[in-house]
Image (tube, rainbow, N blue to C red):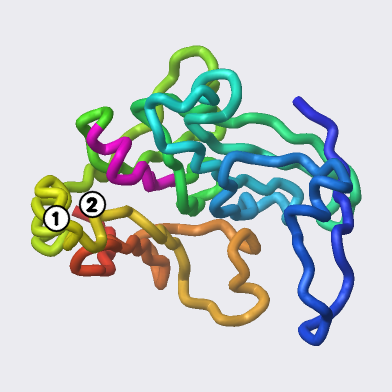
Amino acid sequence: MFDTRWVTLHQGDASSTPFDANALAKAAKATPFKRPENGVFRPGVDFREFFFTETGDTNASSKANGAYGGWGGIYKLSQSDPAADQGKLTIFFNGDQAHTGLDNISFLDRDHVAAVEDAGDSLHTQRGLLDSAYLFDLNADYAKGRQPVRFLAEGRDPSATVDSALSAQGNGFQNDGDNEITGIHTSDGDPTVAGLLGAKNPHPFHGDWRIFWTQQHGDNTTWEITRG
């Protein structure tokens, strides 16, 4: 567990002079992550817990794999109040070759969060696996060998299959590459402040609650997960 403190890098509005956020972050000694991708507040805790994904290097030969975050993972930021300047940061799930490139994230209820992979073409080839989506239980201890539940295993749609063949030929005509499981989204469609993600507990497959995910790089299809 790490103590955290928010650091102000820049204050301004849309008319402000352009600035280099990376340079300012380094100068302020802000904490770097290996490709932080997406984050959501845990529902039912008054915006005091925030979970975010670190996609990592998406390369099986990265020297950062293992102890240095190369495989990515899921982090949890806890604060006593949403407006607090300080908090606690913990690694909820430390990725590995089978569970890496974690990208978009969505709570399905108070205690279960789904994360989808964007491992990329290179890692797909290296590990012989395309992307998957996993369900994580917040009450589980994944540091002791517990594994998340895979609920989606992606193949290639027609356009991505053609692109993959073109890429193998090395003729420069390859475009999008393998499909990517991108957005996963759980919502009841409430457009008001009360509908902010994290404001209320989701109830998938009940009432207006629905779950969607997108399959990009290829046919770019949006899918809905429904009860079987």
Q: Which picture quadrant has residue 219?
A: bottom left
Name the residue located 32 percent from the left edge and 36 percent from the top edge: 123
Q: Amino acid at mark 2?
A: Asp
Q: Residue at x 86, y 49 (%)?
A: 6
Segment colored magenta: 114-125
Residue 115: x and y, percent?
Answer: 44, 45
Mark 1 to mark 2 CA distance (whole Å): 17 Å
Farthest-out residue, bottom:
15
CB-based contact (under 8 Å), mark 1 and mark 2 = no
Inspect the image, locate mark 1, and give the three-letter code of the amino acid beneath it: Asn
Residue 94 appears in the rendering: yes
Instruction: Find residue 173 and report its image quarter.
Output: bottom left
At horizontal 54% and vertical 25% (from top left) the residue drawn is 64
Can you name the residue that lies furthest to the top here?
A: 144
- Residue 169 location in percent, x, y? 10, 48
In reply to whether residue 124 is colored magenta, the answer given is: yes
- Answer left or right for 100 relative to 18: left
Who is closer to the viewer here, 35 or 98?
35
Q: Which mark is residue 178?
A: 2
Residue at disc 2, secondary structure: loop
Residue at label 1? 171
For the N terminus, the image quarter is top right
Q: Does 123 appear above or below 176?
A: above
Residue 87: where, in percent of width, then height? 84, 40
Nearer-the-camera pick, 28 or 67: 28
